[in-house]
Image (spheres, rainbow, N blue to C red):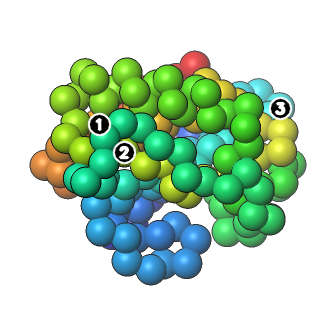
Amino acid sequence: MIQAFDLSYLSRARVWQAVDPFDGSARPTSIAIELLVPRGPRSEYALLGGSVHQDLTGILVRCPEDQGRWQESLVADGDEVRRGLPLEYREAVLREGSQAALEQSVRGAIAYDCAAHGSIGSSPALFGRLAAAIVTLLASPERAANEDYVRKLLEEARKA
């Protein structure tokens, strides 16, 4: 399932549940969030996806660093979006994902396994907020199915 959201202050988001954002293939127990947040003359951008693995524990980052340009992002122009998670964002993903997993009492491991970033508009802070949001949704499929709850979570992730 793919959901598109128009958020406050011209921000936009897409959420993929059990679907790969890049090729549309089925990805059971996975969620990916793409968020575009205009901030004056520039925009913040991030896409991060993760899945639950019951046979493992902890927080894992399994995204390659760079897999080339991605044309289908929410970014219209002004930034080049590339698939992958650069090293400078991984620490924030691990830190915020781990904290959220402790708070949510997640069973199994969360593996962050897909990402896209802007050459200019991405930041560790935004990737960290998405990492926490993904854990929250993966920990509770009931919340993930509630569009109002997902919108509220995206609005929180949008804030700096």
Residue at mark 2 to residue at mark 1: CA–CA distance:
11 Å
Q: Are marks 3 and 1 in contact (CB under 8 Å)?
A: no
Asked if residue 12 shows in the view, the reply is: no
Q: Nearer the viewer, residue 96 or 7?
A: 96
Crowding near pointer 1: few (<14 within 10 Å), some, many (20+)?
many
Q: Is residue 97 above or below residue 15?
A: above
Q: Is residue 2 above or below residue 76?
A: below
Residue 126 lies, in percent from the top left, at 59, 31
- Which amino acid lies under the numbered mark 1 shown in the image of this protein? Thr
For this orientation, the residue located farthest to the left is: 142
Residue at mark 3 to residue at mark 1: CA–CA distance:
31 Å
Q: Earlier in the sequence, mark 2 or mark 1?
A: 2
**Residue receiving disc 2:** 110
Which residue is at a point 30% across and 30% down the rendered structure image?
101
**Residue receiving disc 1:** 136
Q: Is residue 133 above or below residue 116?
A: above
Identify the element where label 2 is drawn: strand
Q: Relative to residue 125, is residue 105 drawn left or right?
A: left
Q: Are marks 2 and 1 in contact (CB under 8 Å)?
A: no
Q: Is residue 17 above or below residue 57?
A: below
Which residue is at a point 23% across and 53% down the rendered structure image?
54
Asked if residue 94 shows in the view, the reply is: yes
Q: Relative to residue 64, is residue 156 drawn left or right?
A: left
- Which amino acid lies under the numbered mark 3 shown in the image of this protein? Pro
Q: Residue 103 appears in which quarter of the rendering?
A: top left
**Residue receiving disc 3:** 41
Q: Relative to residue 107, is residue 112 drawn left or right?
A: right
Q: Relative to residue 108, is residue 58 drawn left or right?
A: right
Residue at mark 3 to residue at mark 2: CA–CA distance:
35 Å
Report the disc number at residue 50.
none
Question: In the rendered picture of this protein, how many numbered marks are placed on residues?
Answer: 3
